[in-house]
Image (cartoon, rainbow, N blue to C red):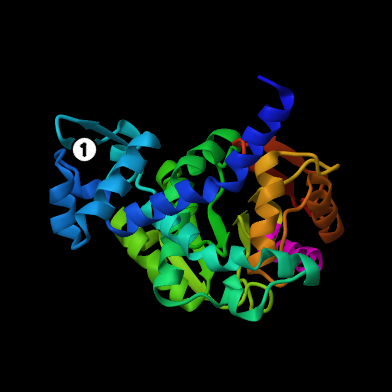
Amino acid sequence: MDPLQEYSTALSGIANAYRKSQALFTAVELDVFSLLIPAAPAEHVAEKTGCSLRGVRMLLDALVAMELLWKGEGRYGNTPMAEACLVKGGPAWQGDIIRHAAANWDAWGGLAECVRTGTCAPPANERERSGPALRNFILGMDNIARFSAQGVLGAVDLSGRRRMLDLAGGPATYSIAFLREHPALRATLFDRPAVIEIAKEQVGTAGLADRFDYRAGDCLADPLGGPYDLVFMSNIIHSFSADENRALVARAFQSLEPGGLIIIKDFLTDDDRTGPPYSLTFALIMLVNTPAGGTYSVSEAAEWTGAAGFLPGRMIPLTAQSRLWVAEKPED
């Protein structure tokens, strides 16, 4: 293929990627995938959703093109990926995080203005979520964290830890996984009051309510409690400015007992900000949704822990998107 044609094709794919996004968002909103167990004709989906047959047939055909559905003998059915991830109750349900992504559509429409001003418009501030938007966000974190929680357990030895702080712990996915693996460990989850109510549901379902405590408040201002021997911070720092993160890490240091461990999990970039690709594009999500958030480099995380008083830390690759920064508080 002519290189210029290759360029044109690649750019067309980028420019029109929103078509697939909106088809997926619409299908999840209508719960199309759950309606196709067992496989069924378009008429069945139209009847159950109250949508037009014309529109449903076009949507289903698009989902076939996206390899989320198969089509044969007048019926549509879920591919293995859709059955695992897009059917309610599936083993890898991703519907909450997809609804959260759909809710960001309007914010992304203002990207050009955010680039001009360097911050988001106040209504888009992710710290102000409530109601269904907050629930989709928090449960969406559970959709994706259940996989990386096992990765953290495989990457860091938590044996001997007895009391952890799950700082801004959202749905408690990580602390639930840690407590299941380490029966002597207890957790305190710190987050906003509305988030804690969602976390309590998850903890109760996991059967771990007797090993959890909760502290409600603003992690940048309110007491964190302690002393703990482990502070875990997953996907927090990208919501805050560098100065806020420096202060937050210092507060975590003060809440730890000597020999305590801090684990920062986030989309940490290379020091020259040439990768990983996901981390670089994720920064734009923070541009359109937070006043001063972004993605930060490994060296920035090291500077924050060093300034707080931690011993020199280490970076541990976790997934294609995430890395860990792990540092220990000196013994007395």
How far across and down, in percent of the image, does residue 79 sit?
30, 33
Choose between 108 and 262: the one closer to the eye.
108
Magenta residues, as a range?
Answer: 238-257
Residue 252 falls inside the magenta stretch: yes
- Which SS does the magenta portion mostly show? helix
Picture quarter with the N terminus: top right
Q: Is residue 206 left or right of residue 176?
A: left
- Nearest the eye: 249 or 31: 31
- Left or right of 276, for residue 69: left
Quarter the C terminus occupies: bottom right
Q: Does residue 147 show up?
A: yes
The answer to whether any part of residue 88 appears in the image is no
The percent position of residue 232, horizontal first and vertical second, equals 60, 54
| Label 1 crowd (10 A; few <14 / some 14-19 / many >=20) | many
Secondary element under disc 1, as helix, strand or loop, is strand
Residue lying at 72% horizontally and 68% vertically, measured from the top left: 114
Check residue 301 for magenta coloring: no
Q: Quadrant of residue 235?
A: bottom right
Q: How many marks?
A: 1
Residue plotted at (56% across, 43% down):
160
Vertical placement of 3 versus 17: above or below?
Answer: above
Reading the image, the residue beneath label 1 is 76
User: Looking at the image, which residue is at 82% across and 52% down?
Assistant: 300
- Residue 166 appears at what percent x and percent y? 55, 59
Location of residue 233 with respect to 91 vertically, above or below: below
